[in-house]
Amino acid sequence: MKTLVKDLDSQLIEEFATKLRGKLIIPSDKAYNETRKIYNGMIDKHPGLFAMCVDVADVIAAVNFGRDNNLLVAVRGGGHNGGGLGLCDDGLVIDLSGIKFVRVDSSNNTVRVGGGNIWGEVDHATHPFGLAVPAGIISTTGVGGLTLGGGVGHLSRKYGLTIDNLLEADMVLADGTVVTVNKNQNPDLFWAIRGGGGNFGIVTSFKFQAHPVKNVIGGPTLWPIERTKEIMEWYHDFIHKAPEELNGFIATMIIPGAPFPDFLHGNQYCGIVWCYTGSQEQFDKLIKPVMDLNPVFAHVGEMPYPSIQTLFDGLLPPGLQWYWRADFFNELGPEIRAQHLKYGSNIPTPLSQMHLYPISGAASRVGANETPWAYRDAKYAGVIVGVDPDPKNAEKITNWCKNYWEALHPYSAGGAYSNFMMDEGQDRVKASYKNNYERLTVIKKKYDPNNFFSVNQNIKPTAN
C-alpha cells in the first residue's frame, strides 16, 4: 500500500524542497493546476507533489524521497503520453521539463539531448548542421517518452526507429544511483530501454546518431473516403517496394479547416502523408503512380525537415480530449479495408483519425530480439485516435475509437506499439513485447526489484 503525500509530515516535505534547485509544487500553489496539465486534456489527475527538476541532482533527490517515503511516483518528460502516465493521483511527479540541452557534434554526427527536451527543440538544433534524428510526426512530443517506447516516424524506412539510433543514455535508477548505458556499459539495461519504456529508470541524457537530412519533399494526397479500399490495396503493394527514401503513412480523416482549401472542409478522406529524402527528379518519378490515382487534393513539395515535423502541430495543440487504441498489422486484406471504409466514413469529430505507419526498410532489418520492440516483421503500426476540444464529446470519441479498434483487432498481429496505448492492463503490455517480455522482467528485477517505476506500460519484475 503506497503512502499518500497528504499523510506526510509537512516538515519532511519542506526539507525535501531544500534539496532541489528546481521548484517543489504542491496543491495549494497558484501554479499547481497549470502544472498538472498535460497534452491529453481527457486526463484529470491530482498529484500530491511536483518535483520540477533542473538537473540530475534534483532527479536523484526526488527518486530517493519517493522511495524512502513509499510514494507512488510518475515521471514526466514532454507530457504527451496518451494514457496520462506522466501523472499519478496523490503521489510524486518527477518532472524533467527543466533538464533541457541539445549539443550537436558535427565531427561524428551525434547529438546529446536532455531528458526534458521535446523533438522540435532537437530539430531546431540539428537542422543548421543538415542533420536529423529519426523521431515521430509531432514536434511537441517529448524526446524521452517517444524514444523509450520505440519511435516511429517520417524517417523510419530510411534510418530506422528512434531506438535504432540511440547510442547511449545516462540514467537514475530506483536506488538513486546514476549509470551510463550503451553497448559496452550495462548492455542489458541498454537493450531494455530501447523499447521497454520508462520501466527501468529515469533517463536524464540521450545520445543519438543523427543523419544527413536537410530538406525533404512531403505533404498530403487525399482521396474521397469511398475509395478507401482501392487506395489501401494499392498502397500496401506500393509502399513496401518503394525506395527506402520514401515514407508515407496512410490515414482515414476529416479535413477540419484551414490551412486546407474550403472545398475540403468537413469531408472524410483516405489520405497519405508523404516524406521523401531524395532528389526532386527521383521523387517526380515515384509520385507519378500516386498522381495517376487522381487525388482530389495534393500538396506535396520541398520543405525543411523541421517543417514536416510541425505540419500537424497547429491542428493538434496541447489540451485536446484524446482517446487512443492501437495494433500492429501484417497486411491490409479485404476484411481490414472494409472496416477502415466503414469507420472512416463515420468519423465523429473533425480531428479524430486513424493512421497506419509502415514498418519496412531499415526499421524491419533489425532483429525481433535485438531490441524489446518485437514487431519488426509487422508491416504497419496502426493507431486510432478520437480527438476533440470539447469534454462533452469525450464519450462520443471514445466509443468510436473502441468500436473501430474492436472491428480491426481480430485481423491484427496481436500487440500494439506501446507509445500508442492507453492504460490497458498487463495482458496488452505482454502482447506488445511478445517473446521479449520475459527477458524484460528479469532485467526489471535486477534494476528495479520493487517496481518503483510502475506508472507506465508496466513490466513487473520476475518472481524468480
Image: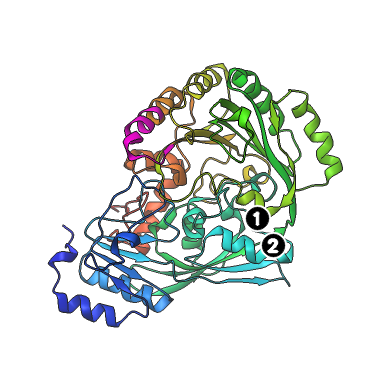
How many C-alpha atoms fall within 10 Å of the one at disc 1: few (<14), some, or many (≥20)? many
Q: Give percent across and percent down for residue 407.
A: 43, 22
Secondary structure state at the residue bearing disc 1: helix
Could you say which is closer to the camera, residue 402 or residue 460?
A: 402
The relative height of residue 97 versus residue 354 in the rendered view (above or below) is: below
Q: Residue 306 bears which disc, if any?
A: 1
Could you say which is closer to the camera, residue 94 or residue 392?
A: 392
Question: First in sequence: mark 2 or mark 1?
Answer: 2
Q: Give percent across and percent down for residue 341.
A: 53, 20
Q: Main secondary structure of the magenta part?
A: helix
Q: Give percent across and percent down for residue 270.
A: 60, 27
Could you say which is closer to the camera, residue 316 or residue 284?
A: 316
Q: In this view, which residue lies farthest toward the front? A: 262
Q: Residue 127 bears which disc, if any?
A: 2
Colouring chosen for the image of the structure: rainbow
- State yes or no: residue 168 in magenta: no
- Horizontal relation, residue 300 to residue 381: left or right: right
Location of residue 231 by image quarter: top right
- Horizontal relation, residue 63 to residue 180: left or right: left
Distance (Cα) linking label 2 and label 1: 7 Å
Secondary structure state at the residue bearing disc 2: helix
Q: What is the three-letter code of the residue carrying label 1?
A: Pro
How many C-alpha atoms fall within 10 Å of the one at disc 2: few (<14), some, or many (≥20)? some
Residue in the picture at 24% in, 55% down: 89
Q: Give percent across and percent down for residue 379.
A: 59, 34
